[in-house]
Amino acid sequence: MIFDIVTLLPEVCQAYCQASILGRAVKAGLIEVRLTNPRDFAPDRHRTVDDVPYGGGDGMVMMPGPLVAALEGLPQGPPARVILLSPRGRPFDQAKARQLAGLERLVLVCGRYEGVDERVRQLAVDEELSLGDFVLCGGELAALAVLEAVSRLLPGVLGGADSAVADSFSDGLLEHPHYTRPPEFRGLTVPEVLLSGHHGAIARWRRKESIRRTLLARPELLAVADLTSALDQRLLAEVRQEEDIPWAPPGDRT
């Protein structure tokens, strides 16, 4: 899969994409990350990409000329979906990551300053995505988050074939707790079931703790999670009893 990132800070994105799992995926040819700087498309010798906003106000706005020119001047490749990272975009989630992982190419546009000229959105952007209800100084962190979330769903990127399947949100629930050596650390011990070697009991414990974590931290997710099996209903009832949380009718499990 090809990722084109349009950014004023290509060195930031390049460093991140050379490390860890993404770096290995790039070296293996599983993904290709291409960086384009709008300053390279600015018409003046100062490489200006921003200007004051019409109507007044604080801050600067990214000009449409260099940004649209950068998008039109991207290296050739398969048809791409162009995404602008913006606080006003639709919230990015695991379901969206799975959808984007089915594409051949993705263009991620990083805003800066107070934002980008609206005409960029109208002329060259397919959709806007946001990491949440907060504001960053630019879109680079958001673009890298999208890149990593999508990349790890691609075949071969993660070491284990089931690694992405067991992630939080993959089945609508938060992930169960993890433990490794030593079995005891500062008075805290690994649950006995995980040391038992009983795969059925371990799977049940993990499912139950996944339900527990979701109920306690993100109860709204239970309304859409797939908990239709008899086992899941028993586990949910057990967790509610153990945590002293009253039963709620189906569709209102919070």
Image: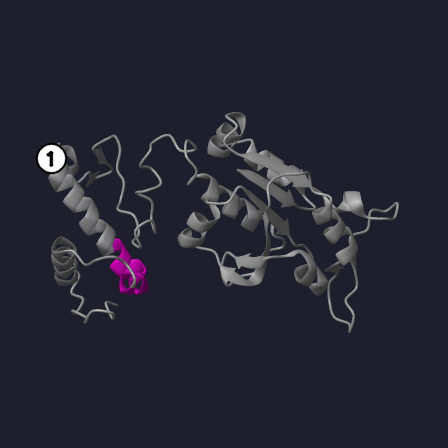
| Kind of residue sitting beneath label 1 | His
Label 1, residues with CA under 10 Å away: few <14, some 14-19, many ≥20: few
In the rendered image, the residue lying farthest to the bottom is 55
Residue 201 magenta-highlighted: no
Looking at the picture, how far across and down is residue 140, in whole percent? 60, 48
Compared to residue 67, the image places residue 61 above or below, namely below
Describe residue 226's horizontal placement relative to residue 4 as left or right: left
Secondary structure that dominates the magenta span: helix
Describe residue 99's horizontal placement relative to residue 237 as left or right: right
Front residue (pair 184, 16): 16
Describe residue 76's horizontal placement relative to residue 81 as left or right: right
Looking at the picture, how far across and down is residue 208, in whole percent? 18, 51
Compared to residue 120, the image places residue 75 above or below, namely above
User: Element under label 1?
Assistant: loop
Looking at the picture, how far across and down is residue 178, in whole percent? 27, 40
The number of numbered badges drawn on the structure is 1
Residue interval drawn in magenta: 213-223
> To which quarter of the image does residue 76 belong?
top right
> To which quarter of the image does residue 117 belong?
bottom right
Looking at the picture, how far across and down is residue 176, in whole percent? 26, 46
Residue 156 shows up from this direction: yes
Describe residue 108's horizontal placement relative to residue 48 as left or right: left
Q: Which residue is mark 1?
A: 198
